[in-house]
Image (cartoon, grey):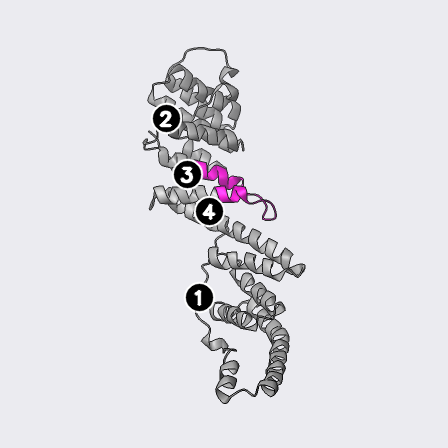
Amino acid sequence: MYVSRLALVAAVALGLSACADDRTGTNRFAYVEEPVEQLYRNGTESLETRRYEDAIAYFAEVERQHPYSAWARRAMLMTAYTEYLTNDFDASLESIDRFLAIHPGNKDAGYAYYLRAMNHYERIRDVKRDQGITRDARDALIDVIRRYPGTEYARDAQLKLDLTLDHLAGKEMDIGRWYLERNQHVAALGRFSNVLDKYQTTSHTEEALHRSVEAYLELGLVEEARRHAAWLGHNYPNSEWYEDTYRVFRRHGQELLDLQAANAGNEEEREELTPEQKLERAGRIRDLDNAPEVLSPQDEVDVTPPTIPGQPPTN
């Protein structure tokens, strides 16, 4: 998952912060006591020139030599950020957790929560693999939006949340298609229903409706197939999936309706139904026009990675 890291470097190196423990290279340089400003400047210069191990080591020295200074707090976040840039997401998350444990009410906590979400977001895997990491990203992004509504962090998190939900919906569709291909229609419908219930605004809603129609027709549930076909046609009338649904329903659905009509005729001969009973039975097949409006029109999902928020905290 691509992120404009150079933009992050330019923004964060001007002001934010970080730190590291012994495992990050605290002893990379011989111990020489230096002014905190110089140590921090060495760290940011190393970061700008992509000498990430040196940057982590300098930020670690800031915290070790000047643990009670404001620079030490800044160095903790800079370490987390540098670890994020090197794809050492576990280390970055540990640094973030340590910062939040020590400085839970700090004004830079918003950036810490945002950086935590970015660590999870960068780890999102291919849709065909386990989605546990994707769910972690979803939860972390929602946490940012909930804690800091209306901020630049929340706006960026919302954009990334849309893509994250699209991944989760894609996984449900992948499993649902697998079941459908093996004629396990009830199991397939469970997955498609998850998409329709939980991920209505993703790009997979149209196909989920179409696949539901296919599954219901295979099960002989014409009414449910009709309802989902109407649902798809009402909300996505120009969709290619709706065109496919129309063809499938006309071909497969008509066969079932003919069979039901024949069966109903045989039953009438045996049961001698009253006119009222015949009308009630005929009314079981509803018009598409009477189907309920369930979905609102799909919001377009922007899958382009958004611009990272600009200047991070500086104090």
102 above or below 242? above
State the SS at label 4: helix
* Residue at the image position 52 percent from the left and 59 percent from the top: 193
Q: What amino acid type should be assigned to the residue bearing mark 2? A: Ile
Asked if disc 1 and disc 2 are in contact, CB closer than 8 Å, the reply is no
Q: Which mark is residue 294?
A: 1
- Classify 10 Å Cα crowding around label 4: few (below 14), some (14-19), many (20 and above): many
- In reply to whether residue 34 is colored magenta, the answer given is no
Identify the residue at the far front of this view. 271
Report how far apart the C-alphas of labels 4 and 2 lie in the structure: 28 Å
Asked if disc 4 and disc 2 are in contact, CB closer than 8 Å, the reply is no
Q: In which quarter of the image is the N terminus?
A: top right
Q: Which of marks 3 and 1 is in front?
A: 1
Sequence-wise, the earlier of marks 4 and 2 is 2
Sequence-wise, the earlier of marks 2 and 3 is 2
Q: Which of marks 2 and 3 is in front?
A: 2
Q: What amino acid type should be assigned to the residue bearing mark 1? A: Val
229 above or below 263? above
Position in image of residue 50 (x %, y %): 52, 28
Asked if disc 4 and disc 3 are in contact, CB closer than 8 Å, the reply is no
Q: Name the residue under label 3.
A: 114
Q: Name the residue under label 4.
A: 160
Q: Answer whether residue 203 is visible to the viewer in this image.
A: no
Sequence-wise, the earlier of marks 1 and 4 is 4
245 above or below 76? below
- Classify 10 Å Cα crowding around label 3: few (below 14), some (14-19), many (20 and above): many
